[in-house]
Amino acid sequence: MADKTFDLIVLGGGPGGYVAAIRAAQLGLKTVVVEREHLGGICLNWGCIPTKALLRTSEIYHYMQNAKDYGLKAENVGFDMAAVVKRSRTVARRLNNGVTHLLKKNKVEVIDGTGKLAGKGKVVVTKDGKEVASLSAKNIILATGARARALPGLEPDGKLIWTYKEAMVPEAMPKSLLVIGSGAIGIEFASFYRTMGAEVTVVEVLPRILPVEDEEISAFALKAFKAQGMTIHTEAKVSKLAAGKDSVKATIEVGGKTETKEYDRVILAVGITGNVEDLGLEGSKAKVEKGHIVTNEWLETGEPGVYAIGDVAGAPWLAHKASHEGVLVAERIAGVKGLHPIDKRRIPGCTYCQPQVASVGLTEAAAKEGGRKVKVGRFPFQGNGKAIALGEVEGMVKTIFDEKTGELLGAHMIGAEVTELIQGYGVAMTLETTEQELMHSVFPHPTLSEMMHESVLDAYGRAIHF
Amino acid sequence: MTIEITMPALSPTMSEGTLARWLKKEGDAISAGDVIAEIETDKATMEVEAVDEGTLGKILVPDGTEGVAVNAPIAILLEEGEDESALKDAGGSAGGGGTAAKAEKPEPVAEKQAPQESKKGEASAPATEAKPAQQSGSGDRLVASPLAKRMAQQAGIDLSKIPGSGPHRRVVKADIEAMIRGDGKAQAASAAQPARQDAAAAKPSAPAPAAKSPTLPDDLLPAYEEIPHSGMRKVIAKRMAESKQTAPHFYVTMDCEIDALLETRKALNARAPKDGPDAYRISVNDFVVRAAALALLKVPAANATWTETATRRFSRADVSVAVALDDGLITPVIRDASGKGLAAISRETKDLAERARAGKLAPEEYQGGTFTVSNLGMFGVREFSAVINPGQGAILAVGAGEQRPVVKNGALAIATVMSCTLSVDHRSIDGAVGAQLMQAFKRLIEDPLTMLL
């Protein structure tokens, strides 16, 4: 059995953990990653990446179905579900191998097993019930991620009632699908299955879908999804799921009425909960609240030398947030100077539905809280030449500025490729530009990015093309 | 020939101060002896008088500038017959002024040199020093984010005075916000030294969740007003925190019966002349100050303070008296309090307290002291414990004299009792010594005639 001393032990090899380990190794720390299942974590194996592969399929399928809009002929358009899933898994595996290689290249040791805190600066690793390693280090990063949250009465069975994991590897296309929860995960699957032809119903307990997004974006998305034929119930609740032989009876409370409907499959997407169990936290000063480990702005837990990053440390549950936190903690441990805590308001969020949604910063409502005066700019895809050429005229770009200082407070986009555009506003925010620099920046023509310029101009009443 | 007016030293130890306010403006005629400006140090405001006469040609250091080094030029005086054109070559010919030690540029950059010249590294020094990118302000580019520039302009803040905490010392929004809040320097200093934050963050045993962090979003707080730190507030914060963090305090409480003292006080005050230079009105606190001073002489081991190399045992009892001000407190010193009579102590305390409230104490009037008396009796406080002034070894916290049941000769009786709590720095003074001091103090207070001995 290995019994080794390191500078840093990372529990979990997802986008938080493996990035933290690589950065730590770059800074000369002797680092080990303990991973129980697969390097790359949920993101790479069962989350961000494989879903993007699936959504790419549905996007191309959508274009093929509408080929005549582009003067093309495509007849007998169809799909092979097994091949679609296989492509998605191949993409995940390829990246998984990539992470393995990167860790090796950076001389990060990887231990296969489940790690657990075992006293100050100690971690014990078990595999199949047997202890395989005993590690010690001054610094330990908990990056164990999260899993789908189950609600009482709404538990997944892995066959008919799915979480993201089963939803990613369907054996066949369900005819009807109920998606519970309209956050990013729920909406992406709803969009995928709807585009592939399923009858999709989305139930959201809050008054609007994509509840963390700006209200205008939520409303825009709702309209678009309904036009695609989705059924969407907001301020509604699924109170019971009864799995039958090959379908599920769902009791849905909506608009004061209770109705029971039958669906082939159900996807539970009602949030996630941190993997805080069996980490050995009980004996430590680290605290767990609402399923997540409590940290300060430097990601320190209550236990000296123990940090928590990524999903297990709480919202926003985004891979890029986890990675960034991993780098910050690694640099802090290594004594890098001039570090700053992460400003969570500057973390962009992307949802890869059709149309795509992307945002960074405050929503208009949040920006106006406390009486702040704002300037809001909007620009529609209809006013953009490239969007029209692409045949993607559905969407808008909204920007919110502080009226007094000209600070870019928030940017919200919906439409084709906006997930690739949002970084521009993210950089602008991080550099603390005002409307002036954005107005003076030259945006290339013809691109969708011109709408980002126009939206800024519109906030100050100067939009040219609308 | 123009004359440079330089930052005066208000005390032998002063190395920098705040130019609080100009009382004359550019173009005003100045006669020798005119009060031209007010200078603030940690605790006092002093007036600057003109030595020469002429016309105030140019103010180099504007109102409210902090950290102005002693001897740095603060204004240029035009002599009779000179006009503004003389200002142009004032810099080059400044040497002729004689008083100008280092007046190269008539720019308000003087304060930047201050921390480097200051021998005692003030808290602000590390932040301001390491700032080559913004040193001269003459032609160098200011490194600041566009948002920071605009916010600084709107808030009327000189960007060149802000130490940037962003990449390559770029001034960012957070720096401006910190400056507006009034803790700009502290912010920058901590950003420059993450290691120190490590230590601080590791200390609290609680997990320091987001709720406790300085980045608590405002929307979780009720509306608040931000009161910028005055120089005094900063000094109090620094010194009190330093004391509690470095000096291990222990406390000795003693109940003193003061019926006899009150009788004596009444008798003495009854003899006081109504007015004139000999008038007096002795307070209970005056007795306390004198008793404390006499007790310190009786127990010299308690009249001591800790230094890293040795314990300093003082030969004289200089008693500081805590005086509450509107926005802080100050401790003027009754020097050699054991050598002064009650009337003298009373008059001196009254005079110092009045001038303290007016902000007119000279530094030597509140610096030093070997022991402090803090009295909250007038608020009806029964007893409390005080924080030792750094540089001293103990402080006496005095409560209200109040009638309490006491047991005398096996029977209940009523006495006027005053509880006093001594806070002691255990590094230099042990428990038994503290107790002896309180014992001596109690004897003097309870038998006030012995204070005459």
Image (cartoon, coloured by chain):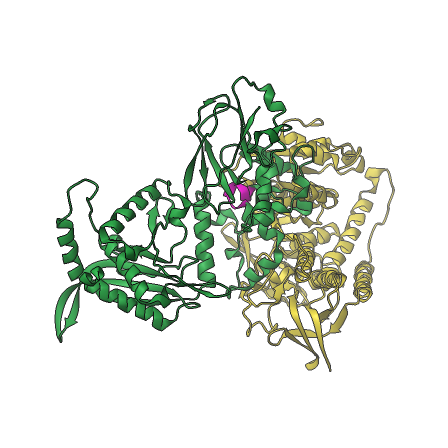
Chain colours: A yellow, B green
Closest to the observer, A234 or A294: A294
Closest to the observer, A304 or B342: B342
Residue shown at the point (32%, 60%) measured from the top left? B396
Q: Is residue A298 left or right of residue A353?
A: left
Residue A154 sits in quarter: bottom right
Residue shown at the point (28%, 59%) measured from the top left? B398
Query: Image height check: is B57 above or below B74?
Result: above
Image x and y of residue B400, in percent: 24, 57
Does the stretch in magenta take in A234? no
Which quadrant of the figure contains the N terminus of chain B? Answer: top right
Do we see residue A141 in this rendering? yes
Does the stretch in magenta take in B179? yes
Q: Residue furthest top?
A: B81
Stretch of the chain drawn in magenta: B177-184
Image x and y of residue A121, in percent: 63, 73
Residue A363 sits in quarter: top right
Q: Is residue B376 left or right of residue B415?
A: right
Query: Image height check: is B79 above or below A266?
Result: above
Which quadrant of the figure contains the C terminus of chain B? Answer: bottom left
Do we see residue A170 in this rendering? no
Residue shown at the point (75%, 66%) measured from the top left? A39
Residue shown at the point (87%, 42%) measured from the top left? A73
Closest to the observer, B235 or A156: B235
Image x and y of residue B112, in percent: 59, 41
Q: Magenta stretch mostly in which secondary structure?
A: helix
